[in-house]
Each structure stands twice: as structure tokens, then as C-alpha cells.
Amino acid sequence: MSNFQLSIIKYMHITNFKHFLDENGNIPTDMPKEARELANFLALLIDDATNGDYDAEPTIRCTEKGCEGLVVAFVTHDTDDIYWVCPLCKTNGYITDWRGTKWDNCD
């Protein structure tokens, strides 16, 4: 038997962030509650991944029910997407089309 340990991925979310924005680049207040909560979560991840403080401790709580993990987010160099993961429950995802939004802190 091999000593190889497989890390199970619970959920993988792949999200085009601009699909959550209105024509002015805002998260609409009239979108359904669950969609608005997801959009706000993604905005926090974009802000966190692009703020330049790469040594900061994670502060964004995982959104999976029953999970108390803190999400880590960073910009990938190969695709320029934002990858995020909860180390506790392994829920993770990619955020695409986030450049130029008001949560983008890149120069």
C-alpha cells in the first residue's frame, strides 16, 4: 500500500466576477440574497488577494455550512485568475474577469 495521501476537494467554484456586476461595476442590491452574498464574498477575496499584504493572516471565513476555516486567496501567475481555498474543508475556486473592478487593488 502506498503512503500517498489524496487531498479530497469538496467543491470547486469557477466564477466570472463580472457576471455579478451591473453596468456601473457595482453589485446590484436587487439581485437575490444568495447571489448577493456570493458576490460580496468574491469581492472580499479579490480585495484580499490584490492588497499586496501577502504575509497577512487569513481573515475571510469560509462560507460552507459548518466550516470555521479561514480562506486563503492569491493571484495565479499563469492564468491571472484568483485562486482561493479553505484549508479546513478544501472548498476552493477560481475567480476570473476581476481585473479593473473596484475591488482590484493592483497597480
Image (tube, rainbow, N blue to C red):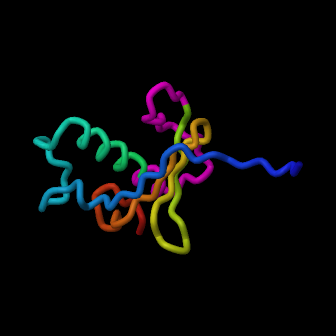
Magenta: predominant secondary structure element?
A: loop
In front here: 18 or 24?
18
Which residue occupies the extreme front position in the image?
A: 1
Which residue occupies the extreme bottom position in the image?
A: 78
Left/right of residue 3 with respect to residue 83 in the rendered view: right
Up-down: is 82 above or below 42?
below
Q: Residue at x 87, y 48 (%)?
A: 3
Q: Residue at x 15, y 43 (%)?
A: 31
Indicate whether residue 52 is drawn in magenta: yes
Q: Residue at x 34, y 49 (%)?
A: 43
Residue 73, position as x, y percentages in the image? 51, 51
Residue 76, position as x, y percentages in the image? 53, 66
* Image quadrant where one finds the C terminus: bottom left
Magenta range: 46-68
In front here: 3 or 65?
3
Left/right of residue 61 with respect to residue 5 in the rendered view: left
Up-down: is 27 above or below 57?
below
